[in-house]
Image: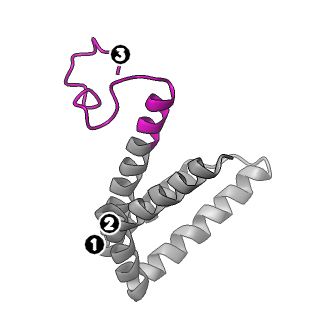
Amino acid sequence: MSQEVFEQALELGRKIAESEEFKEVQRAESAMLKDSEAQKLLMEFQLLQQQQRQKQQSGISLTAEDIKQFEQIESKMLQNPLIKSFSEAQHKFQELLNAVNETINKTMLGKKDVAGSGCASGSCGGSCGC
């Protein structure tokens, strides 16, 4: 890898770490991890997820009851305000990463319509190829 590309990647990583989206993920995660109820729900979810994964890897199909149980614990988790806040912060951060990746890809392909130029929002009506 070219040294210049590597240095630019390091700078991009630092800028992303300074972003409000990343900081919000960190704040939400910290609050969630300090809460015993949220921790209990997360552990219950992870255990059930692991059990169902092992079942599937053993060639056993999940039953309707298995799926219902998974959906119930997932719903219960997302009703917890700290878990919900963390999930929303993660989603916003992932959107930022996706936009950065899309911008890099478009730039590498030589497209002029990179994020921030107005076209990335779809406001052009599709005529520019974005």
- Give me the disc on residue 9: none
Q: Which residue is drawn at 54% across and 76% down?
A: 43
Which residue is outermost to the right?
A: 58
Q: Residue at x 43, y 82 (%)?
A: 33
Using the image as rendered, state which of residue 4 and residue 123 is in the foreground.
4
Question: What residue type is disc 2 on?
Answer: Lys
Q: Which residue is drawn at 39% across and 61% down?
A: 15
Judged left or right of residue 10, residue 61 is right
In 3D space, how far apart are the residues under numbered discs 2 and 3 (Cα atoms)? 36 Å
As helix, strand or loop, the secondary structure at mark 3 comes to loop
Position of 17 relative to 120 (above/below): below
Contact? badges 1 and 2 (CB < 8 Å):
yes
In the rendered image, which residue does mark 1 sit on? Answer: 81
Using the image as rendered, state which of residue 18 and residue 126 is in the foreground.
18
As helix, strand or loop, the secondary structure at mark 1 comes to helix
Residue 19 magenta-highlighted:
no
Instruction: Name which quarter of the figure residue 73 lies in.
Output: bottom left
Using the image as rendered, state which of residue 21 and residue 109 is in the foreground.
109
In the rendered image, which residue does mark 3 sit on? Answer: 129
For discs 2 and 3, the disc positioned in front in the rendered view: 3
In 3D space, how far apart are the residues under numbered discs 1 and 2 (Cα atoms)? 5 Å
